Image (cartoon, coloured by chain):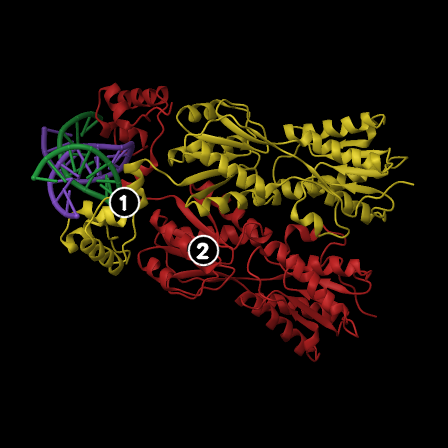
Chain colours: A yellow, B red, C green, D purple
Amino acid sequence: MMKKRVTIHDIARIAGVSSATVSRVLSKSSYPVSSELRQKIEQLAEEHDYIPNMVGKQLKTHTNTTIGVIVPTISNPFYSSVVLGIEEMARRNNYHVFLCNSLQNPKQEDEYLEKLFENQVKGVILSSISFNRKLMTRLIKLGLKVIAIDQPLDLPDVLQIKFDYRKGGYMAAKYLADQGHRRIAYVTAPLDRPSRQSIYEGYLDALQEAGIALEEQLVKVSEPTGGDETRGEFENGKLLTRQLLELSELPTAIFACNDMTAFGVISELTEHGVKIPEHISVVGFDNIDFSQMIAPPLTTINQPSYEMGKLAYNMLMELMNGGQAEMDIVLQPKLVQRSTVTAVK
Amino acid sequence: MMKKRVTIHDIARIAGVSSATVSRVLSKSSYPVSSELRQKIEQLAEEHDYIPNMVGKQLKTHTNTTIGVIVPTISNPFYSSVVLGIEEMARRNNYHVFLCNSLQNPKQEDEYLEKLFENQVKGVILSSISFNRKLMTRLIKLGLKVIAIDQPLDLPDVLQIKFDYRKGGYMAAKYLADQGHRRIAYVTAPLDRPSRQSIYEGYLDALQEAGIALEEQLVKVSEPTGGDETRGEFENGKLLTRQLLELSELPTAIFACNDMTAFGVISELTEHGVKIPEHISVVGFDNIDFSQMIAPPLTTINQPSYEMGKLAYNMLMELMNGGQAEMDIVLQPKLVQRSTVTAVK
DNA sequence: CTGAAAGCGCTAACAC
DNA sequence: GTGTTAGCGCTTTCAG
């Protein structure tokens, strides 16, 4: 078993030609080869189940059709959607993806980065949580192309696909204010990531604009955990909502930093018999697929994950093909009105 | 920019030793090298930012630390959880994953399989939807190791991680029957996959055991679509529930072939003002993370996705290390009682 | 202990 | 049109 694989040399020997000729036809080179030989070689390759060895080719040509994708965790639907977008574009271009879950661990991220590079990967798309830019800088100097999504990564030659989190936070809170809400709570995971910080600032912007004084007790920030986030966000939503529910005067609306947290908010609210949106309105952030699958469907801010993935891929390819590194993109948030918000009387 | 990468030869030249020696120390070979040389080389490597080229190593040694993972779509939380499990084990072992979404397309699956093989990948974990076993058989003969998850793949030398779908279907329906339900509807995606067929059979088993005559009008099977499933399943759940709602006599319980479909069921039911579980009980299948995040939390059948991923990885490694191909595993379903089922009066 | 040399599978000058 | 040859970066006999 596990018989030796047939190479172009084997085919060459059998066909009685040189391996160069075989290479030329089997690699679909444009180099001229007589059609008799071409046919003969193709047939022989077929007969002998020839399958090219890309490793050999890679070593010779320094080409590589893998791109690295580093995200916190694929089990977060937002990222799985981004990754799907990337993979879909990659497939169409005969590229493929080397998937890395950094699990919020900067060390993990760096290890993957290095491994990617060792494997001659030329391009990476990542949502970076590392603060140490040393390795990254070094790799970029060695030719690695990088697209940062979701989290900013201010390094020369890195292209970014940003998202206007602040505006998103603003839109959500403003929408609530426009509906007559004045006691708008904000429930969030730790503000340790720039994206989260920005959403919070947007919330603040909207309050100020609406002339609503910030009530400290209405903003609940969870403790940093480290570990499995996906489940954690939901639990955070529940936990923080429980705290909110203990207030002498309840908020009339709760804005959550992401949909998963909003699910936690809704779950806890429901368990306590408070009706959504009759008693309390809720708005999320992200617009993951599930947000429209719950009852009532969640009003939220759309962050175009799938498109983000496709865009990131395209930008990476442009970079890798020698394009200029000078066009960051800022994706715009959009309010998705569904059924978890009502106007206050 | 993009300066040439430093190789062991560069280091050798600078150190005034042979590249063989450099290789021996930098590849952490057990081969004896004097500690002075060793130190010198290590330092030089450090100084010059040496990063090994795995492609060269691979070509020489025929080793490869990539495993292929082919799933229908990563955007389905069940699969993203499986993949996370695989990736986590792989990372610990210094392996990594080449992610493939077959998107329910057999051709896609085959293309990926071939690409994987071209890239010298030695092991694959897949949820196969292809019926053509020709390519797969050929690759296995050439030494590819394969673990089938989720969908059966009856080929010699393929190890399977099965799940007792039939029993799962049985448990769900039996639970409903035990709660006094007699009009139990079954709502499912097309029965074109063995797994789905089995769940349905389990449902039938339970009805029969409970002495309930099958009512054709209570089993609703959606039309095959092709395309984005994740969203589709939810819509299917809604659609089929709408049909159920038109019946002159409503079911008292609805069993859905997976959680996502169950969400659709619940959504539609809620929109029509029917209360869960007061009016109609619902049970899902899979126990994806979200099933506990909705209100009320979904009663469902647990399919251990994450563990399945880890298990699959371990089995693959055993196969790749020359272990025997003779231990299929059948994972057992478990009923997860939450709040969408009530006893019938 | 160290080095010389061969070669993994493939491509690309360069010659014929 | 076709063949010869020289590597890509690495490991690994085999000598010394």
| Residue B125 appears left or right of B138 | right
Look at mark 2 in the image and give the residue it sits on.
B108
| Residue A333 appears left or right of B159 | right
Q: Do labels 1 and 2 share a chain?
A: no
Mark 2: amino acid: Gln
Mark 1: secondary structure: loop
Image quadrant where one finds the N terminus of chain A = bottom left
How packed is label 2: few (under 14 Cα within 10 Å), some, or many (20 or more)? some
Residue closest to the eye, B31 or A238: A238
Res A177 → quadrant: top right
Mark 1: amino acid: Ser
Image quadrant where one finds the C terminus of chain A = top right
Q: Mark 2 lies on which chain?
A: B
| Residue A26 appears left or right of B343 | left
Instruction: Please identify, in this view, whether the residue under mark 1 or under mark 2 is nearer the observer.
Output: 1
Look at mark 1 in the image and give the residue it sits on.
A29
User: What percent of the width, then of the height, locates residue B314?
Assistant: 45, 51
Q: Distance between the residues labelled 1 and 2?
A: 25 Å
Residue occupying image coordinates x 52% and y 60%: B150
Q: Mark 1 lies on which chain?
A: A
User: What percent of the width, then of the height, locates residue B318?
Assistant: 40, 53
Asked if residue A163 shows in the view, the reply is yes
Res A202 → quadrant: top right
